């Protein structure tokens, strides 16, 4: 190969390369790399925001689901509470009614007893009065009839004999 | 010491990068030797009639640099695009067109430029009187005979090609940058094509090798070398004017690129990086006289490998393609052309892959070296 003057090519390569490099750096690489980087950033940002939107959407859906779940649970709770309350009320009122009934019954019993006692007393007094008057009438009657008296006594004595 | 991920990655990449070089080294040599044999035979038969076809010379002139851009031959005369010659002589700067040499490349005619007698031999311009005193051996490596020639800062074919690629790429990326200002949405058109490459360099080269914190600082450099090397590799594969230069297959060019990576790596080196060189952790201090030179050589071998790899890969590819084309002229029959044409097509497609691959490897290894220099080590 022809080894021509080395200084020529070395000199010009150095000069051209440096000038070329500086020019390209200023007018080409800086704007190109800047634009590429800028666009990459914007793409990354767009992707990130899409991702965050998706996540937000997911969160929203999850929220909705959660709220729905909560509402459902609340409804269930309310129903349960209502049922419990109802049952409690029924039970309470049953118990109350029972107590009331029992009390009324006992009161009635007491009243009845009292009435009965009063009636009995009344009856007793009536009976005694009546029997007194009967006895009086009888006595009056009997005493007016000696024969009958004798018969009575005889009867009574007869009964005694039977005993 | 535990092999870190980066070491393994580096070894893998180095291995992969060297495959095309080793794989195709043999065919190159074979075809060249075939070419030489063929030329020798041919010379024996028809030497007196006309100048024999010399494949080596053709290949050398195609992969080398030159002061004029040869376009075609028309009616036996070469048609060239003449590039300016810029010389720093012992009396000052001289600028003139390479047309003045009249295609002379064997120091046959001396030309007079402001009192300096100049000759051109094998694309090196000498002072005519001093050239005559050089021995044959010295003339072979005449480019390094700095006493016999003026300093040469000519716009050669490669320099011209580099200017052109830099301008094309600058306009291209300026258009991309503009399109972002107008269009804030997804990239369209040329931006849509180049943006994946930019993000590829960022996400697959810079980020994993330099690290999330520091990669941004090195992005402009990595992007510039990736596209610069790639585009210039591709320009070298286009076989007609104003392309076809072998810029990335020129060791001076790869030397400058590797040197820049070396300078950036060295300047970016943090405490841990220098600590590893001058006081390798886990190594007894009395080994320092061995370790420090080894580590310092290690600093240099990395960019040296970068320089050689790119140069060798691209040059090897060009040599293979040119050898295959030369077969037609060596055998002097059109019958060979379908075969060599098919091989050239295959090689050209392969070279397109290699063009991208070598740009990737150069960028990746640069990123890896920078990454090693800026890495914050946990204490092993």
Image (cartoon, helix red, strand yellow):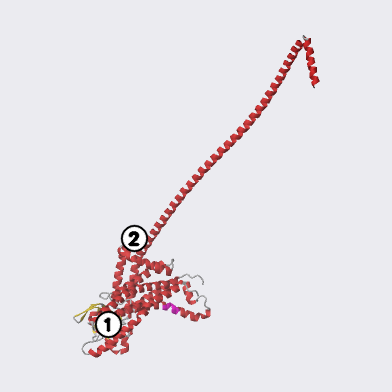
Tag 1 residue: B327
Tell me: residue A133, above or below residue B25. above
Tag 2 residue: B186
**A62, A104: nearer the viewer:** A104
All told, the count of numbered labels is 2
Q: Where is residue B27, by image quadrant?
A: bottom left
Residue B374, given in percent of the width and then of the height, sits at 44, 70
Residue A23, given in percent of the width and then of the height, sits at 33, 68
Q: Residue at x 39, y 67 (%)?
A: B202
Can the viewer see residue B155 in this picture? Answer: no
Rounded to the nearest angstrom, the CA distance separating label 2 from label 1 is 50 Å
Crowding near the residue tagged with mark 1, few <14, some 14–19, many ≥20 C-alpha atoms within 10 Å:
many
Residue B34, given in percent of the width and then of the height, sits at 30, 85
As helix, strand or loop, the secondary structure at mark 1 comes to helix
Mark positioned earlier in the residue sequence (2 or 1): 2
**B124, B297: nearer the viewer:** B297
Q: Is B298 covered by the magenta stretch?
A: yes
Q: Where is residue B154, by image quadrant?
A: bottom left
Q: Which residues are magenta?
A: B296-301
Residue B272, given in percent of the width and then of the height, sits at 48, 72
Residue that lies at the very extreme toward the left in this rendered image: B75
């Amino acid at each position: 190969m022809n080894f021509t003057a080395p200084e020529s090519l070395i000199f010009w390569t150095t000069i051209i390369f440096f000038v070329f490099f500086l020019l390209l750096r200023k007018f080409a690489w800086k704007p190109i790399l800047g634009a590429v980087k800028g666009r990459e950033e914007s793409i990354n940002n767009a992707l990130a925001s899409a991702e965050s939107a998706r996540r937000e959407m997911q969160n929203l859906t999850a929220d909705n689901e959660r709220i729905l779940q909560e509402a459902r649970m609340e409804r269930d709770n309310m129903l349960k509470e209502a049922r419990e309350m109802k049952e409690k009320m029924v039970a309470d009122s049953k118990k109350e009614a029972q107590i009331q009934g029992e009390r009324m019954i006992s009161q009635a019993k007491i009243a009845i007893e009292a009435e009965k006692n009063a009636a009995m007393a009344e009856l007793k007094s009536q009976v005694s009065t009546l029997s007194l008057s009967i006895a009086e009438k009888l006595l009056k009657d009997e005493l007016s009839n000696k024969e009958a008296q004798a018969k009575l006594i005889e009867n009574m004595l007869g009964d005694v004999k039977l005993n | 010491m535990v092999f870190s991920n980066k070491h393994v990655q580096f070894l893998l990449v180095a291995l992969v990068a060297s495959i095309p070089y080793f794989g195709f080294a043999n065919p190159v040599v074979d075809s060249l030797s075939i070419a030489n044999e063929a030329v020798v035979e041919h010379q024996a038969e028809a030497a007196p009639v006309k100048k024999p076809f010399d494949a080596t010379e053709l290949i050398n002139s195609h992969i080398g640099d030159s002061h004029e851009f040869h376009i075609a031959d028309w009616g036996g005369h070469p048609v060239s695009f003449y590039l300016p010659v810029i010389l720093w002589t012992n009396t000052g700067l001289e600028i003139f067109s390479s047309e003045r040499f009249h295609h002379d490349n064997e120091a046959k005619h001396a030309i007079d430029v402001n009192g300096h007698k100049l000759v051109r031999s094998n694309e090196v311009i000498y002072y005519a009187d001093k050239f005559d005193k050089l021995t044959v051996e010295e003339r072979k490596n005449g480019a390094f005979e700095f006493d016999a020639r003026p300093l040469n800062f000519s716009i050669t074919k490669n320099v011209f090609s580099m200017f052109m690629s830099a301008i094309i790429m600058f306009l291209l990326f300026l258009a991309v940058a503009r399109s972002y200002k107008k269009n804030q949405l997804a990239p369209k058109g040329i931006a849509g094509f180049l943006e994946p490459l930019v993000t590829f360099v960022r996400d697959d080269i810079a980020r994993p090798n330099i690290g999330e914190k520091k990669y941004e600082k090195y992005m402009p450099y990595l992007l510039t070398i990736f596209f610069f090397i790639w585009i210039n590799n591709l320009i070298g594969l286009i076989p007609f004017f104003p392309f076809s230069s072998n810029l990335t297959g020129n060791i001076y060019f790869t030397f400058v690129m590797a040197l820049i990576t070396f300078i950036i790596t060295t300047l970016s080196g943090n405490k841990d990086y220098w600590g590893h060189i001058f006081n390798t952790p886990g190594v007894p201090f009395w080994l320092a006289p061995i370790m420090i030179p080894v580590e310092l050589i290690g600093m240099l071998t990395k960019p040296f490998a970068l320089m050689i790899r790119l140069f060798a890969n691209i040059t090897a590819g060009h040599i293979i393609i040119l050898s295959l084309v030369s077969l037609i002229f060596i055998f002097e029959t059109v019958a060979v052309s379908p075969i060599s044409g098919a091989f050239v097509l295959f090689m050209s497609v392969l070279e397109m892959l290699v063009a991208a691959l070598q740009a990737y490897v150069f960028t990746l290894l640069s990123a890896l070296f920078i990454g090693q220099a800026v890495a914050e080590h946990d204490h092993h």
